[in-house]
Amino acid sequence: MNLYRQQTDADLMMSLREGNGHAFAEIYDRYWKKLLAVAYNHCRDKIISEEIVQEVFISLWNRRQALCIDNLNAYLATAVRLSVFKQCLRQKRRVQIIEQTAGPVIAAWDEEMIYTRFLQQQINGIVETLPVQCRLVFKLSRVEGLTIPQVARKIGVAEKTAQAHLTKALKVLRLKLNRSFLWAILLASIFMP
């Protein structure tokens, strides 16, 4: 590795084009702190800055054979600035879309409130698909806050029957919510930029 520390940027780039991982590691060691400072100076967010620098290095590795770089330092710094700019544009566009589609009231809500509302809609939709007795027991127990003995008396069934309906409803909810959560993650990974 000491051999690579003595090499110029041009020599490292030639080795990098040939797929030399040691040359890449030396470029990374030589520039990551500087690039992190450049990114942080522009976006003022350490985590985003780290992600941007990692993306720039990944891009350098992936495009190593096609790149013709005269000044590696300037190239990497420019790539980081461009990535920060793109990140800012994406964030600005997300805010615009939320404001346009959700209206001013929803735009003011925080993410947790939106997620809670979405989850409640999911639960309500699943509850409506339950058999009548299950749905009734679930609503009396979870929405109105009645105990199992109170639910059993109110609908005229044994406590064990009411408990069985509630257990079934909760099992169906847990299963379907897990599936919808997995689908949401899958869709988000497909459609996120």
Image (spheres, rainbow, N blue to C red):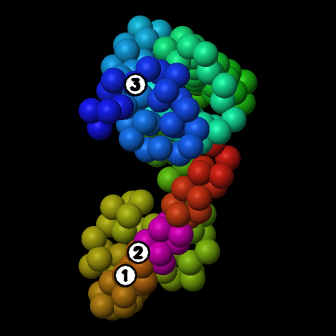
Q: Which segment is the magenta one? A: 172-179
Query: Who is closer to the viewer here, 147 or 110?
Result: 110
Query: In the current view of this chain or complex, which residue is farthest to the right?
Result: 100
Query: Who is closer to the viewer here, 6 or 169?
Result: 6
Residue depicted at 66% across the width and 30% down the height: 67
CA distance for labels 3 and 1: 68 Å
Looking at the rendered structure, the number of numbered marks drawn on it comes to 3
Quadrant where the N terminus is found in the figure: top left
Label 2, residues with CA under 10 Å away: few <14, some 14-19, many ≥20? some
The amino acid type found where label 1 is placed reads: Thr
Q: Is residue 9 left or right of residue 128?
A: left
Q: Nearer the viewer, mark 3 or mark 1?
A: 3
Q: In the drawing, what numbered circle is on residue 7?
A: 3
Q: Say which element carries label 3.
A: loop
Residue depicted at 59% across the width and 62% down the height: 183
Look at mark 2 in the image and give the residue it sits on. 170
The percent position of residue 162, horizontal first and vertical second, equals 36, 84
Label 1, residues with CA under 10 Å away: few <14, some 14-19, many ≥20? some
Q: Does the magenta stretch include residue 122?
A: no
The amino acid type found where label 3 is placed reads: Gln
**In the rendered view, would you say 54 is above or below 33?**
below
CA distance for labels 2 and 1: 5 Å
